[in-house]
């Protein structure tokens, strides 16, 4: 599956909305996949993202192999640091935390990851990652030691997204954070979407199907659902 980005780009051009289910290896036990995978296959998901802010388990490879065997969806790494790289996946979001000024997340982790990725067959997708204040401190803000962008200052979000695009990022990812109290504001999604030409991913704090629809309407090209699915694997049938 070496065409993940092209498919995302074509979907944007065609107005087709995409959905990723995010699985955190620290929260997904191997023996639970037997029950989770059928729920994923029955859902409208188009992608599976794998990763977390602080992954301590060593089961990432095994989880991905099981997913590859029993689903047909592209599996994309969404890593918090280079230790979360798995050559078993189809691709990786090569993240730059544009909203923060911690050099580890601006370039240091990327430098450490580059030699590993060079030797892999992973499709590498350069992604500008932008944290938006969400009403509580999320794990990614704590681990990255960065402050999210102000919730209602859309101009900063737009300028940061444009900077990411001009630097060559292929995707912009607006993130409220795992377990966020509030999702990314719809007006922020709308203004960023209208100002950038590359696909826009939105995740964090979306708790129901209406929240997904609202993000799509505002301009998200791909929405990510993580905590809501972790808490309720029947999320897509119960919402």
Image (cartoon, helix red, strand yellow):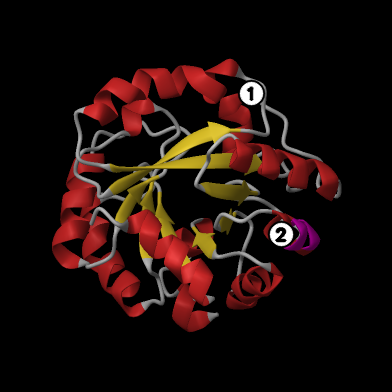
Q: How busy is the neighbourhood of tag 2: few (under 14 within 10 Å), some, or many (20 plus)?
A: many
Q: Looking at the picture, tell me which residue is in the foreground, 158 or 66.
A: 158
Say left or right for 171 vs 136: left
Count of all numbered marks drawn on residues in the image: 2
Check residue 189 in the rendering and tell me which mark sits there, or answer none. Answer: 2
Q: Earlier in the sequence, mark 1 or mark 2?
A: 1
Farthest residue toward the bottom?
A: 237
- Name the residue at 50% across, 46% down: 170
The image shows residue 46 at horizontal and vertical percentages of 38, 69
- Residue 119 is inside the magenta segment: no
Magenta stretch, residue numbers: 187-191
The image shows residue 47 at horizontal and vertical percentages of 37, 62
Q: Which residue is mark 1?
A: 145
Point out the image quarter for the N terminus: bottom left
- Name the residue at 80% across, 41% down: 156
Q: Quarter of the image holding residue 35?
A: bottom left
Task: Note whether residue 20 is visible.
Answer: no
Q: Looking at the picture, tell me which residue is in the foreground, 23 or 119.
A: 119
Q: Marks 1 and 2, how far apart in space?
A: 24 Å
The image shows residue 86 at horizontal and vertical percentages of 25, 37
Q: Quarter of the image holding residue 44?
A: bottom left
The image shows residue 146 at horizontal and vertical percentages of 67, 27
- Name the residue at 62% across, 63% down: 206
- Name the residue at 54% across, 24% down: 105
Of circles 1 and 2, which is in front? Answer: 2
Task: Note whether residue 161 is visible.
Answer: yes
Q: Main secondary structure of the magenta part?
A: helix
Check residue 107 in the rendering and tell me which mark sits there, or answer none. Answer: none
SS class, disc 2: helix
Say left or right for 44 vs 209: left
């Amino acid at each position: 599956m070496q065409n993940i980005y092209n498919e995302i780009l074509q979907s944007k051009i065609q107005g087709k909305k995409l959905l990723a289910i995010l699985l955190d290896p620290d929260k997904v036990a191997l023996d639970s996949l037997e029950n989770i995978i059928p729920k994923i296959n029955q859902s409208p998901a188009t992608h599976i993202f794998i990763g977390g802010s602080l992954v301590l388990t060593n089961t990432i490879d095994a989880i991905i192999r099981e997913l590859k065997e029993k689903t047909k969806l592209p599996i994309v790494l969404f890593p918090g640091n280079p230790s979360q790289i798995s050559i078993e996946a189809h691709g990786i979001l090569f993240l730059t935390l544009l909203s923060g000024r911690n050099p580890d997340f601006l370039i240091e982790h990327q430098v450490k990851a580059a030699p590993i990725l060079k030797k892999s067959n992973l499709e590498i997708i350069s992604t500008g990652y932008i944290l938006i204040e969400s009403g509580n401190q999320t794990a990614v803000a704590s681990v990255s030691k960065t402050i999210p962008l102000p919730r209602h200052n859309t101009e900063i979000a737009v300028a940061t997204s444009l900077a990411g695009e001009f630097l060559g990022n292929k995707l912009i990812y607006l993130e409220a954070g795992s377990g966020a109290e509030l999702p990314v504001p719809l007006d922020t999604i709308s203004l960023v979407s209208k100002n950038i030409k590359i696909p826009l991913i939105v995740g964090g704090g979306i708790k129901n199907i209406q929240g997904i629809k609202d993000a799509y309407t505002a301009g998200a090209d791909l929405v990510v659902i993580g905590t809501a699915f972790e808490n309720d694997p029947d999320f897509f049938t119960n919402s």
